[in-house]
Image (tube, helix red, strand yellow):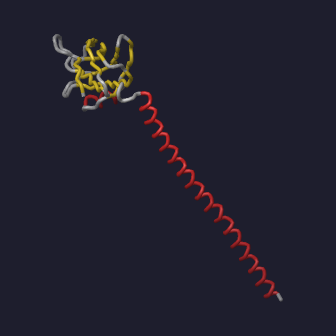
């Protein structure tokens, strides 16, 4: 009788252990499935956000009226930009203070989009002010006036900062 009772107790114990392990596996599978669903939803939300950003940009800045201004440093120049200020049609539209990483990127040939906006077709006065330090370490502030002619379609303008010597053209404007 003791052996029969022992077998029954072992059988019940095995059954309880197998049921409890099954009960633990089921929630793990459910949690794993839930995590996968959350990640899938997160990916969908990020994709929708990117599409909304593109649509917003198309609505706010239609290509027929869009004007984009970029800043770059001429190749080989060691000028250190502290700030750039952009005035379009007499209104300040952009002002940027540069970090070390941004300066490093510009000196390696990088380009910064400093302004995107809508303008009517025609001529627009553009005033660019650059504040910084020359290669020799002396402070400088240069201001140049330009005329931007906007036609139907997007307009891309590059502001290039070059040498800071007296008599040299520090700021130049080029169409892209």
Name the residue located 36 percent from the left edge and 10 percent from the top edge.
Answer: 90
Name the residue located 28 percent from the left edge and 29 percent from the top edge.
Answer: 106
Name the side, left or right, on which 76 lies relative to 6: left
The one of 166 and 125 positioned closer to us in this rendering: 125
The quadrant in which the C terminus is found is top left
Residue 173 locus on image (x, y percent): 23, 20
Name the side, left or right, on which 73 lies relative to 49: left
Name the residue located 82 percent from the left edge and 87 percent from the top edge.
Answer: 2
The tally of labels here is 0
Quarter of the figure with residue 73: top left
The one of 95 and 134 positioned closer to us in this rendering: 95
Residue 44 locus on image (x, y percent): 51, 47
Residue 79 locus on image (x, y percent): 24, 21
Residue 103 visible in the shown view: yes
The residue lying furthest to the right in this view is: 1
Residue 126 visible in the shown view: no
Q: Is residue 48 above or below residue 19?
A: above
Name the residue located 55 percent from the left edge and 49 percent from the top edge.
Answer: 41
Residue 66 locus on image (x, y percent): 35, 26
The quadrant in which the N terminus is found is bottom right
Q: Is residue 137 above or below residue 16?
A: above
The residue lying furthest to the left in this view is: 167
């Amino acid at each position: 009788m003791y052996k029969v009772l022992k077998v029954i107790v072992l059988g019940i114990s095995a059954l309880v252990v197998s049921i409890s392990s099954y009960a633990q596996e089921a929630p793990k599978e459910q949690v794993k499935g839930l995590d996968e669903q959350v990640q899938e939803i997160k990916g969908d939300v990020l994709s929708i956000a990117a599409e909304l950003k593109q649509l917003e940009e198309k609505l706010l800045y239609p290509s027929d009226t869009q004007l984009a201004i970029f800043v770059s440093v001429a190749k080989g120049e060691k000028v250190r930009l502290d700030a750039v200020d952009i005035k379009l049609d007499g209104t300040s539209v952009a002002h940027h203070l540069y970090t070390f990483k941004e300066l490093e990127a510009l000196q390696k040939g990088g380009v910064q989009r400093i302004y995107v906006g809508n303008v009517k077709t025609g001529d627009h006065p553009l005033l660019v002010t650059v504040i910084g330090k020359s290669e020799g370490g002396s402070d400088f502030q240069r201001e140049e006036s330009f005329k931007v002619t906007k036609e139907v379609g997007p307009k891309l303008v590059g502001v290039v900062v070059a040498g800071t010597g007296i008599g040299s053209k520090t700021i130049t404007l080029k169409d892209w």
